[in-house]
Image (cartoon, rainbow, N blue to C red):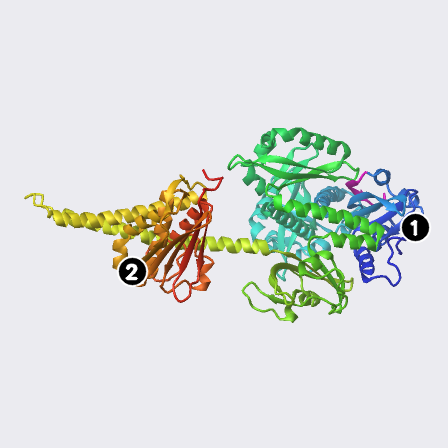
């Protein structure tokens, strides 16, 4: 079957057109295109093959009138298809399920979609149809066949019982009828407990043919041990009660195989009016039982699948009463099936969404069509309303009426990020439909609009399509020639997330060309021309023909650098938190321990009986140590509070005229003892008067932090503090001659909880420089670390003489 003008690939055209046409031809769904006069413009191989097999009617050629073909369908089916086609020509998309098939032949369920189509300026429509699963239909048919077989067996048993008084000819006709349904007959003497089995029944029991009567004990040995006691009791009851008898039991053949048998019979009385004979027929129903078991297992598997999917699933009867709810609904709503049936589900819906839901359901019932809408459903665990996408699809019977409704509800509350992709997918799908109607130009437009990069290779590895997103992500100019295997492509270096180099034979494109299918493969890409790096998520798959030969390979990718950076930042934050907890627990515990020890020592020196107490000098030394540790503890707590306020932008500043040189001298005076103990000579080079609008307490804290750091990390070396004025700015330098700060630590030196030495003897939470930076920023100034000539570190603070206009 050839495609019409704008669907057929142009001779000698690009490989993408051949690929598109071959893809449509390989679809298992029906695809038909008709113009406004019901003349066939296109159909794929699936329709040509199934239409002939299902209806026994040949398909018209291109341009042929489809009305004659539709006339071969039963009236309800023909009317449904014609109505859907007419509405599609008017621009209304139609989606419904129905049965198709000749009036006297088997019926097959299909889901049908009709859409309008522009045929080079002429109105037309496209129909696609997908075969539906027939699990429930097969189960109903199997149960119906089983019931019919049981009825036939019972009827034949009654006929057999009545045949005792008929001629040999009637008995022969009855035996022939029983052979048609593969049933055997028996007559059991209830008083002598002897059975007479025909040849068919003996085959069903798996015993050799014999005309001799069979004792009850021999029959019971054939019966499966599980049913033996029940069958024996059944036979004993038949010896005391006239009338019909029936049952199902298992027998074991000599080869140890087990068969299911169903029998029906009648107990007849002798001349004395007491039960004499049990006459009936027995049929092998093993295949039916196996089919029922398989169907039940499939139904159980489907129900188990429905219970494990993260989607709410339900089934409603024709009258909309609930027949089934899955586990997701029960867990989400807290309602079982009974509570849900009693209207409980309505109470979980948001009142504002009920009118739209009722309207959609009424329209769906009136038109026998699916409905879809978004509504909010309350979660039982916390009472929160969450948005769900609700869908309900009717399952139509042979008359085209809903036999039941299948519904799902998908939680879309967290769809902010995925909504863009959903809209993009909808746009892509709409563009794909237009591509099917208008050919290769529209197809290339769709590929160009994708936000993900896409590259299509032929079987030899030649690039035959590279969309703009792929060029943009890879930094490839639009005019670069990428055809063939090399082209003018920028060369790359690929590494895994651990930094290991990926050889070219294991690149995603090579894997897809080898026939591998993969997705979510994250690799680090480095362009060799400019050294830029980014992280991409790759998906790839081969495209094969109907014989399994690979024709193409598709590779898609998108940038996940931001997500990876966020994950790494989160991991760094967790590590910083753990490091802080370790340091804080040690730093807070040390002064507490010293304080407790000093108090305990003082308490032990006091004799409660004699009233003798330590000397004033001893108490003074004890309280001095305790006071220093308490002040140290208070300083740690104050630093932590300032860090917390800084994180919430609540670090308070109170600006007033302040002499920065005098402030530095006062702070230095507070560190006289610490400087002496550390062996750090101090030199000051201060301008006599540098006065500005500053927060005096905060600047004391900042200068103290810088001086404290120099004392701790540069013990035994000179510390120099200089202050000068540059126009409307004050410049303060604190320089030490210690070991300095390693280059790898400088980028993070002002971060909270950062300590740039591993010496555990040096105490501190790693907050001093962080708070110093926050205080300087609060004054509208800057602080930086420079590398002075020689050894040591130099911190330069620049402060405006007037506070920033935004300061509180």
Estimate the x, y position of residue 583 in percent, counting from the top left.
Answer: 36, 54
Estimate the x, y position of residue 141 in percent, counting from the top left.
Answer: 73, 45
Which residue: 58% across, 50% down? 227
Secondary structure beneath dot 1 equals loop
The quarter of the image holding the C terminus is top left
Q: Is residue 690 left or right of residue 242?
A: left
Crowd class of label 1 (few under 14; some 14 to 19; many from 20; radius 10 Å): some
Whether the residues at callouts 1 and 2 have beta carbons within 8 Å, the answer is: no
Estimate the x, y position of residue 189 in percent, counting from the top left.
Answer: 65, 47
Which residue: 25% across, 54% down? 673
User: Which of the 4 quarters of the picture holds residue 707?
Assistant: bottom left
Estimate the x, y position of residue 224 in percent, counting from the top left.
Answer: 59, 54
Q: Nearer the viewer, residue 80 or 791?
A: 791
The numbered mark at residue 60 is 1
The quarter of the image holding the N terminus is bottom right
Which residue: 10% across, 46% down? 613
Give the vertical position of 660 relative to 92 (above or below): below
Which residue: 66% across, 46% down? 420
Q: Give the residues drawn in magenta, as a range.
A: 92-104
Secondary structure beneath dot 2 equals loop
Q: Is residue 659 left or right of residue 524?
A: left
Residue 102 forms part of the magenta stretch = yes
Q: Earlier in the sequence, mark 1 or mark 2?
A: 1
Q: Nearer the viewer, residue 614 or 166?
A: 614
The answer to whether any part of residue 510 appears in the image is yes
The numbered mark at residue 684 is none
Give the spatial CA distance, label 1 vs label 2: 106 Å
User: Which of the 4 quarters of the picture holds residue 457?
Assistant: bottom right
Q: Nearer the viewer, mark 1 or mark 2?
A: 2
Name of the residue lying farthest toward the right? 64
Residue under pointer 2: 681
User: Which of the 4 quarters of the picture holds residue 315?
Assistant: top right
């Amino acid at each position: 079957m050839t495609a019409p003008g704008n669907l057929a690939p142009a001779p000698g055209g690009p490989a993408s057109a051949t690929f598109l046409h071959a893809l449509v031809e390989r679809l298992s769904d029906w695809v038909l295109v008709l113009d406004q006069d019901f003349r066939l413009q296109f159909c794929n191989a699936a329709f040509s093959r199934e239409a002939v097999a299902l209806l026994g009617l040949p398909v018209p050629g291109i341009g042929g009138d489809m009305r004659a073909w539709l006339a071969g369908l039963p009236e309800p089916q023909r009317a449904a298809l014609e109505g859907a086609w007419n509405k599609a020509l008017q621009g209304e998309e139609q989606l419904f399920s129905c049965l198709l098939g000749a009036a006297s032949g088997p019926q097959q369920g299909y889901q049908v979609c009709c859409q309008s189509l522009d045929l080079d300026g002429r109105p037309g429509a496209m129909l696609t149809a997908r075969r539906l699963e027939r699990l429930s239909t097969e189960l109903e048919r199997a149960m119906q066949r089983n019931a019919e077989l049981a009825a036939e067996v019972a009827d034949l048993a009654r006929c057999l019982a009545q045949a005792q008084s008929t001629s040999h000819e009637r008995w022969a006709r009855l035996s022939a009828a029983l052979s048609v349904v593969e049933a055997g007959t028996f007559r059991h003497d209830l008083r002598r407990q002897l059975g007479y089995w025909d040849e068919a029944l003996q085959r069903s029991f798996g015993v050799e043919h014999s005309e001799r009567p069979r004792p009850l004990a021999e029959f019971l040995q054939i019966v499966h041990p599980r049913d033996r006691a029940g069958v024996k009791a059944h036979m004993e009851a038949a010896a005391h009660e006239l009338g019909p008898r029936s049952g199902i039991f298992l027998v074991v053949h000599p080869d140890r195989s087990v068969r299911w048998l169903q029998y029906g019979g009648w107990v007849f009385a002798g001349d004395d009016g007491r039960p004499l004979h049990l006459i009936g027929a027995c049929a092998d129903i093993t295949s039916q039982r196996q089919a029922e078991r398989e169907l039940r297992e499939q139904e159980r598997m489907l129900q188990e699948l429905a219970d494990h999917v993260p989607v709410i699933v339900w089934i409603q009867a024709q009258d909309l009463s609930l027949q089934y709810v899955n586990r997701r609904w029960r867990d989400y709503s807290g309602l079982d099936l009974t509570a849900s049936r009693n209207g409980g589900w309505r109470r979980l819906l948001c009142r504002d969404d009920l009118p739209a839901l009722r309207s959609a359901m009424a329209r769906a019932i009136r038109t026998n069509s699916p409905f879809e809408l978004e509504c909010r459903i309350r979660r039982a665990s916390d009472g929160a309303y969450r948005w769900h996408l609700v869908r309900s699809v009717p399952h139509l019977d042979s008359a085209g009426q809903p036999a039941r409704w299948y519904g799902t509800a998908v939680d879309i509350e967290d769809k902010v990020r995925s909504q863009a992709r959903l809209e993009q997918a909808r746009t892509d799908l709409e563009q794909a439909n237009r591509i099917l109607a208008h050919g290769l130009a529209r197809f290339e437009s769709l590929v160009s609009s994708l936000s993900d990069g896409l590259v299509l290779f032929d079987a030899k590895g030649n690039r035959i399509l590279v969309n703009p997103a792929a060029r943009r992500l890879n930094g490839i100019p639009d005019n670069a020639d990428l055809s063939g295997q090399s082209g003018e492509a920028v060369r790359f270096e690929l590494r895994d997330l651990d930094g290991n180099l990926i050889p070219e034979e294991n690149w995603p494109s090579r894997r897809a060309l080898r026939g591998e299918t993969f997705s979510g493969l994250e690799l680090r890409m480095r362009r060799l021309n400019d050294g830029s790096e980014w992280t991409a998520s790759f998906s790839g798959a081969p495209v094969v023909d109907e014989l399994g030969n690979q024709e193409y390979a598709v590779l898609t990718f998108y940038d996940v650098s931001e997500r990876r950076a966020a994950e790494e930042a989160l991991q760094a934050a967790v590590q910083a938190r753990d490091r802080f907890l370790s340091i804080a627990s040690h730093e807070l515990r040390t002064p507490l321990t010293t304080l407790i020890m000093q108090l305990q020592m003082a308490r032990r020196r006091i004799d409660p009986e004699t009233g003798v107490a330590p000397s004033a000098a001893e108490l003074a030394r004890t309280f001095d140590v305790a006071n220093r540790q308490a002040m140290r503890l208070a300083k740690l707590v104050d630093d932590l509070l300032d860090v917390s306020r800084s994180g919430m932008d609540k670090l308070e500043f109170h600006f007033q005229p302040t002499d920065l040189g005098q402030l530095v001298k006062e702070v230095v005076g507070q560190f006289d003892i610490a400087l002496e103990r550390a062996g750090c000579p101090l030199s000051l080079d201060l301008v006599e008067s540098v006065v500005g609008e500053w927060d005096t307490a905060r600047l004391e804290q900042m200068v103290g932090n810088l001086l404290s750091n120099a004392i701790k990390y540069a013990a035994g070396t000179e510390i120099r503090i200089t202050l000068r004025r540059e126009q409307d700015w004050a410049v303060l330098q604190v320089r030490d001659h210690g070991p300095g700060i390693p280059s790898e630590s400088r980028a993070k030196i002002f971060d909270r909880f950062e300590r740039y030495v591993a010496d555990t003897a040096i105490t501190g939470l790693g907050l001093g420089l962080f708070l110093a930076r926050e205080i300087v920023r609060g004054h509208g100034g800057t602080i930086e670390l420079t590398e002075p000539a020689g050894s040591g570190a130099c911190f330069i603070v620049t402060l405006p003489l007037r506070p920033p206009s935004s300061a509180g």
